[in-house]
């Protein structure tokens, strides 16, 4: 029931009018108790219970807002208009602000059904340094909806008494005296408290200092100081909202064993002590699903059997009917090792020699053969050759990237809908702040381990251009994609523990140095994290698959064109001999500075086309354990694949894109060479 309703009801016989100058005055030695809360939370019922039938009513000075005042024992009780925050955007808020500022004790009435909304005002009252007790009203409705609020934990997190009440049954109303006598200051953020002290010297009360920092011009003018800026207000609001989200996610859950389990898991996920081991377990599961099952087994089948064995074979065989082509068929054993090789030459196409073409079909048709086509016509080679715009790009998009991207979006949707991903962002927020980022950056960084191109597009969800630049640079420099990870894992397992340790330390060092430099020299600041923490639960599979489908479709639709552009660039480089020129340029750096065989230069050039091509090219070289460390470190820090490069240019512009691309060349060889000069 609203206070205005009470006022009208008793207007003729149960109240007296006040002089407006006396509205906020109080008798000597009498404490003011203020009832505060959002609209329609039942404050008036508490006021009526405390004051009995007799109330004083007056319009607040300068407004048409009526306020009610009563007494309870030695306390003066004030009701306030329902507000969502203490501020001065309208008359109700101005009245509530002034009454709360003058109050000694605040009884904050909260609707337990809308905890996330109402606790925002609660946190503000606590940050004002007021003595507060919280009435958790409508608690009976919470139980009817099979929800549970951990009142004890809520009290611990807020630092004030929390009392469950019911507006219908009046349960808990008998504790109002206890609530007044035990009202106290709650838990406050040390950072905010420190910030308030800078204003407190010129204002006098913590409550007014906070209101001024939040931009209240009236209170600021009263003390002759400027109000806080919009950025300060936004930062305070976002931190308060995040605090409320964390509290709600911890204390409110489904009233069942399952609900209690997920609530406990949610609490553990945001605590670094327990959250980091949980993250390690999640990453291991994700690695075995994507890095092993999808990348190795599914993609091996889709790319080699469906893509190259079926799609490319039939397309190239068809094209070869009408154009000069040399064909090599490798016959392999069950383990994929070549047993014998058969070469065919068709100077006028397969149709010109039907008998030889039939022999080629017969030998190359069975599974266990590998067929390569060398077209003589440059134009045909550009579209259907080894780096053909049509053959390579379609195989890459449909048979390699599509299952990989779909699997990653499936995992991300699973983590997101379960409520784990927002908690991971919250837990890592403080650490990522040191890199100039906020917790939201964890999403593109994790996606980068699947596909750097996909992750580069996802940087759009970050709040500022500065953050996008930092994450893009980290992705291009130090995050190996899933296909590359598999090769790195195999080679490092062959090298041993010491080379592996050197590799990990090197990559982490580059990550820290790179992000620190970017954070220091790029203008601007990281944006604060504003993220909801939904209850942890088992996600619905239909929602997961819907998200996976639409996100995968969106990515493929946007990225496909740029993959064709990248393939065209590589094809032109091959036709014009630029790939060979690059190999010749890299060879002396590879042999003298990196102390690797000259053939390793080919792996680096192939790494420009596809990162896994480059890493896989190292398989065939005879390398010592330390040479493996040098090669893997260099290929990890090396330039992005051609698709990532093109997408990076599109997202970050030519200037930033080329700077990052050139930087990866320089630092990959610099760091790899330093390791080589020390250990090889």
Image (cartoon, rainbow, N blue to C red):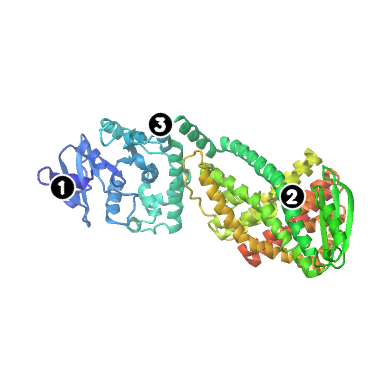
Please tell me which of labels 1 and 3 falls first in the chain. 1
Nearer to me, 461 or 370: 370
Dot 1 crowding, Cα within 10 Å, few <14, some 14–19, many 20+:
few
Dot 3 crowding, Cα within 10 Å, few <14, some 14–19, many 20+:
few
Determine if residue 425 is in view.
no
Give how far across and how far down residue 144 sits, in percent.
Answer: 34, 34
Q: Which residue is mark 1?
A: 8
Nearer to me, 423 or 397: 397
As helix, strand or loop, the secondary structure at mark 1 comes to helix
Point out the image quarter for the N terminus.
Answer: top left
Give how far across and how far down residue 520 sits, in percent.
Answer: 61, 56
Q: Which residue is mark 3?
A: 152
- In the rendered structure, are the residues bearing label 1 and label 3 in contact, judged by CB atoms less than 8 Å apart? no
Residue 170's disc is none
Mark 3 vs mark 2, CA separation in Å? 60 Å
Determine if residue 382 is in view.
yes
Among all residues in the image, which is located at the extreme left? 13
Mark 2 vs mark 1, CA separation in Å? 81 Å
Q: Which residue is mark 2?
A: 305
> Eyeballing the image, is 680 above or below 646?
above
Give how far across and how far down residue 455 sits, in percent.
Answer: 62, 54
């Amino acid at each position: 029931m609203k206070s205005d309703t009470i006022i009208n009801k008793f207007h003729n016989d149960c109240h007296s009018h006040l002089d407006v100058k006396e509205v906020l005055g109080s008798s000597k030695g009498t404490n003011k108790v203020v009832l505060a809360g959002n609209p329609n939370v039942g404050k008036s019922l508490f006021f009526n219970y405390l004051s009995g039938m007799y109330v004083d009513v007056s319009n607040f000075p300068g407004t048409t807002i009526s306020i009610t005042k009563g007494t309870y024992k030695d306390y003066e009780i004030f009701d306030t208009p329902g507000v969502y925050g203490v501020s001065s955007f309208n008359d109700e808020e101005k009245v509530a602000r002034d009454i709360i500022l003058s109050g000694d004790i605040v009884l904050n009435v909260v609707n337990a059904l809308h905890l996330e909304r109402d606790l925002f005002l609660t946190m503000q009252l606590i940050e004002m340094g007021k003595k507060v007790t919280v009435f958790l009203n409508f608690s009976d409705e919470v139980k009817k909806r099979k929800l549970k609020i951990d009142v004890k934990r809520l009290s611990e997190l807020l630092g004030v008494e929390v009392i469950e009440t019911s507006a219908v049954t009046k349960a808990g109303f008998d504790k109002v005296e206890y609530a007044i006598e035990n009202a106290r200051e709650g838990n406050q953020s040390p950072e905010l408290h420190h910030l308030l002290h800078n204003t407190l010297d010129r204002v006098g009360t913590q409550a007014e200092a906070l209101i001024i920092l939040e931009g209240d011009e009236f209170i600021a003018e009263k003390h002759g100081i400027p109000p806080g800026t919009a950025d300060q207000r936004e930062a305070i609001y976002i931190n308060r909202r995040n605090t409320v989200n964390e509290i709600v996610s911890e204390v409110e859950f489904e009233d069942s064993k399952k609900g209690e389990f997920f609530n406990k898991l949610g609490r553990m996920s945001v605590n670094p002590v327990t959250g980091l081991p949980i993250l390690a377990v999640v990453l291991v599961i994700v690695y075995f699903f994507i890095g092993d099952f999808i990348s190795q087994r599914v993609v091996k089948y889709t790319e080699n059997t469906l893509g190259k064995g079926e799609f490319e074979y039939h397309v190239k065989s068809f094209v070869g009917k009408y154009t000069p082509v040399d064909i090599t068929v490798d016959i392999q054993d069950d383990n994929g090792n070549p047993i014998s090789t058969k070469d065919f030459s068709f100077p006028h196409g397969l149709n010109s020699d039907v008998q030889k073409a039939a022999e080629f079909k017969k030998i190359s048709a069975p599974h266990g053969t590998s067929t390569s086509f060398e077209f003589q016509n440059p134009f045909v080679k550009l579209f259907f050759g080894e780096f053909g715009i049509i053959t390579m790009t379609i195989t890459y998009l449909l048979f390699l990237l599509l299952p990989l991207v779909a699997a990653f979006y499936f995992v991300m949707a699973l983590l997101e809908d379960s409520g784990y991903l927002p908690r991971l962002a919250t837990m890592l927020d403080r650490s990522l702040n040191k890199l100039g980022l906020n917790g939201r950056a964890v999403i593109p960084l994790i996606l980068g381990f699947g596909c750097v191109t996909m992750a580069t597009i996802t940087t759009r969800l970050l709040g500022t251009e500065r953050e996008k630049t930092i994450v893009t640079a980290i992705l291009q420099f130090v995050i190996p994609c899933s296909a590359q990870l598999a090769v790195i894992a195999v080679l490092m397992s062959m090298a041993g523990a010491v080379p592996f340790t050197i590799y990990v330390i090197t990559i982490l060092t580059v990550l820290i140095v790179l992000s620190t430099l970017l954070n220091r020299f790029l203008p601007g600041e990281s944006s604060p994290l504003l993220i909801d923490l939904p209850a942890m639960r088992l996600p619905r599979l239909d929602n997961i698959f819907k998200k996976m489908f639409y996100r995968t479709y969106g990515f493929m639709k946007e990225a496909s064109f740029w993959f064709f552009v990248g393939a065209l660039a590589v094809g032109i480089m091959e036709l014009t001999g630029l790939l060979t020129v690059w190999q010749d340029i890299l060879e002396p750096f590879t042999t003298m500075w990196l102390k690797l065989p000259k053939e390793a230069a080919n792996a680096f050039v192939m790494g420009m086309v596809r990162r896994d091509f480059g890493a896989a090219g190292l398989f065939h070289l005879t390398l010592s354990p330390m040479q493996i460390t040098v090669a893997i470190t260099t290929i990890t820090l090396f330039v992005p694949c051609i698709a990532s490069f093109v997408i990076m240019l599109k997202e970050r512009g030519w200037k930033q894109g080329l700077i990052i691309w050139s930087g990866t060349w320089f630092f990959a060889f610099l760091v790899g060479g330093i390791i080589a000069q020390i250990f090889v």
